[in-house]
Image (cartoon, grey):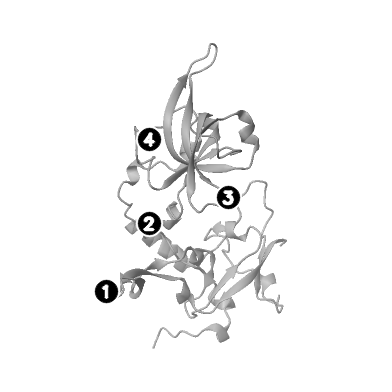
């Protein structure tokens, strides 16, 4: 088979460093500290690592595009003989094609039966967070250019605490109280966070479909000042406004989100790395 991608491995000696814990408050000082008696989950990096039940070690590949190889349990339906005598002194994976790969075809590997069982159990027991039925993800909002965006007076939550809005705009002078948006802004590389949508204007032109323009308050960082300032811009079209997940608010950060390492087959995992005896 041909080499799809090489992947050097980052070595994590103790998988417990990826554990996450709740906080406690020290009643004498009022300061927060990590409560190791209250584990709350694992860091996202665990999903991109490989491990083995008999080892505390994790191996994390960092080759190009190797984080986009998804699970398929039927990839290796029988052992591949030509792999048995291929050895070198590099701690890394080589992803090798077992057949021709067609254009736009997804490339998959086998994450292991333990990963698959853990995933199936997670799906079976998953309870969605409160309010999920009303949540609209950013990619859906970004695909809708016709529905009117709600103003701050109409919805003070700004869609939800999980969503941030950004506007393509270039601030030329912070001395101006207001400024007008123009189409040249789309060619720039600056996006500013929308603090609030102040006003929505319905525009009707002969021979064109109805559309909307918006007056916005943007949060702008001013050089030489610590605090952000509000900068008002008028007549912003929908195409200049984009939705993003708020920091740490995408699906992968939901409490109880799936976390499990991919499993290295038992027959290729070295005995010297096996430091956990589950029978003791």
Occupied quadrant, residue 98:
bottom right
For marks 4 and 2, the one nearer the N-term is 2
Tags 4 and 1 touching, CB below 8 Å: no
Q: CA distance from mark 3 to mark 2?
A: 48 Å
Question: Which residue in the structure is indicated by mark 4?
Answer: 152
Foreground tag (2 vs 1)? 1
For marks 2 and 1, the one nearer the N-term is 1
Please tell me how crowded label 4 is: few (under 14), some (14-19), or many (20+) other residues with Cα within 10 Å. Answer: some
Q: CA distance from mark 1 to mark 3?
A: 40 Å
Please tell me how crowded label 3 is: few (under 14), some (14-19), or many (20+) other residues with Cα within 10 Å. Answer: few
How many numbered dots are placed on residues in this image?
A: 4
Instruction: Estimate the x, y position of residue 162 in percent, counting from the top left.
Output: 40, 48
Secondary structure of the residue carrying tag 2 is helix
Tags 1 and 3 touching, CB below 8 Å: no
Foreground tag (1 vs 3)? 3
Between 236 and 49, which is closer to the camera in this rendering? Answer: 236
Give the number of the disc on residue 123.
2
Q: CA distance from mark 2 to mark 1?
A: 39 Å
Q: Is residue 140 above or below residue 124?
A: above
For marks 4 and 3, the one nearer the N-term is 4
Foreground tag (4 vs 3)? 3
Q: CA distance from mark 4 to mark 1?
A: 39 Å
């Amino acid at each position: 088979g041909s080499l799809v991608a090489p992947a050097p491995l980052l070595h994590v000696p103790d998988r417990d460093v990826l554990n996450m814990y709740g906080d406690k408050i020290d009643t004498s000082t009022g300061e927060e500290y990590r409560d190791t008696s209250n584990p709350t989950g694992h860091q996202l990096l665990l999903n991109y690592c490989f491990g083995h039940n008999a080892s505390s070690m994790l191996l994390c590949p960092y080759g190009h595009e190797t984080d986009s190889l998804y699970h398929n349990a039927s990839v290796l339906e029988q052992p591949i003989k030509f792999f048995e005598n291929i050895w070198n002194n590099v701690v890394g994976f080589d992803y090798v094609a077992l057949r021709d790969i067609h254009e736009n075809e997804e490339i998959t590997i086998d994450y292991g039966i333990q990963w698959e069982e853990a995933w199936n159990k997670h799906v079976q027991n998953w309870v969605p967070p409160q309010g999920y039925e009303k949540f609209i993800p950013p990619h859906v909002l970004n695909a809708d250019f016709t529905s009117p965006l709600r103003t701050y007076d109409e919805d003070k939550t700004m869609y939800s605490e999980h969503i941030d809005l950004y506007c393509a705009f270039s601030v030329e002078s912070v001395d101006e109280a207001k400024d007008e948006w123009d189409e040249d802004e789309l060619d720039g590389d600056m996006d500013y966070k929308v603090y609030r949508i102040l006003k929505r204007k319905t525009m009707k032109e002969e021979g064109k479909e109805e559309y909307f323009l918006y007056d916005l308050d943007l949060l702008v960082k001013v050089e030489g000042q610590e605090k952000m300032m509000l900068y008002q811009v008028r007549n912003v079209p929908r195409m200049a406004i984009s939705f993003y997940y708020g920091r740490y608010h995408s699906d992968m950060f939901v409490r109880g989100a799936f976390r499990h390492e991919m499993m290295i087959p038992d027959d290729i995992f070295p005995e010297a790395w096996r430091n956990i005896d589950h029978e003791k």
